[in-house]
Amino acid sequence: MKVVILDGYTENPGDLSWDWIKEMGCSLDCYELTGPDKIIERAKDADILVTNKCVISGDIIKALPKLKYIQVIATGYNVIDCKAARDRNIVVCNIPSYSTNGVAQLVFSLLLEMTQQVGVHNESVKNGDWVSCPHFCYHKTYLTELAGKTMGIIGFGKIGSAVAQIANAFCMKVIVYAPRPKEYSGFGTVEFVSLDRLNRESDVITLHCPLTPETDKLINAGFLSRCKKSAYIINTARGGVVDEAALAKALDDGDIAGFGADVLSCEPPKADNPLLRCKNSFITPHIAWANIEARTRLMNIFKENLAAFMSGKPINVVN
């Protein structure tokens, strides 16, 4: 079987290996990045198509007569027209639950940066400010601790519950909004509340919901107007959950204390994205999933998926 990887760079920029695919008896064409106009040309002979962010539409599926299996090397599979694949009896699989710890870790990396401003103070020290300071201690920004603060979590799947465990360890009060409240078996306690109550009471709001018609621009001007002015918002879910223009205005007007994000509505962002130039905005380039442990785990699950498909018993099927 021929395997074609359309955008393999982000999963494997050179520190992992694709050789195991050939060892399974498949031929392999691997591309670091593929533009929309190149997908059909590169995938025309593929039995197995591998994508992360390349969109595989129904028209593309129709143009690939040999295609039998599509592997999304991510958890989200909205880039695939699953109905068109199902109509052709093409199996579509994803990679579940490989980056939970990494995403939860980055939530607190962003939160601690906003509340402690480590980067600002490190730069200040290295610029000589401490050397020339008459006092043994100074601070250039407002500093605050997390203990006793209320963290509001929107969405409570595996990542949301992992974030709750860490928040409990920081002695934070945890409240959660989820469409379907569930038992929580992690360390500490959480309270399930209405979205309105979470909006009003939270000192930190962290987003862990999928992007759906119901959550599109959930964090909008109305939502922001009900937040505490001292609140921090963190988005490691999907960029579209946030109305970026409204949030940038709230930050510049001082209606929100800070925003941390690992995702934006368009990635890479356009130069005119208002969150790139507003104050108190901290943005990382979609790296929560990209630590070596998570990417190795992803690769191993992909290996298991491919072996299962080739044996006639596919797993992690999403269509």
Image (cartoon, rainbow, N blue to C red):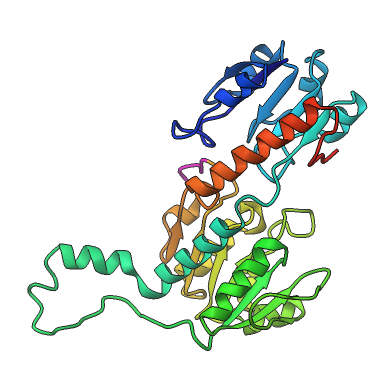
Residue at position x 60%, y 69% in the image: 163
The range drawn in magenta is: 268-272
Nearer the observer, 197 or 173: 173
Report whether residue 203 is seen. Answer: no
Relative to 302, 284 lies left or right: left
Residue 230's place in the image compared with 53, above or below, is below
**Residue 58 place in picture, x, y as percent:** 81, 26
The rendered magenta stretch, by its main secondary structure, is classed as loop
Q: Which of the two residues, 218 or 18, is positioned nearer the viewer here?
A: 18
Residue 195 quadrant = bottom right
Furthest-right residue in this view:
87
Q: Nearer the viewer, residue 39 or 199?
A: 39
Q: Position of residue 66 (x, y in %)?
A: 80, 13
Q: Residue at x 63, y 84 (%)?
A: 201
Image position, residue 112 (x, y; %): 43, 71
Residue at 54 percent of width and 26 percent of height: 33
Between residue 253 and residue 6, name the one nearer to us: 6
Taking the magenta stretch, the answer to whether it contains residue 271 is yes
* Residue drawn at (77%, 53%) of the image: 212
Q: Quadrant of residue 209?
A: bottom right
Q: Is residue 27 visible?
A: yes
Where, by quadrant of the figure, is residue 227 drawn?
Answer: bottom right
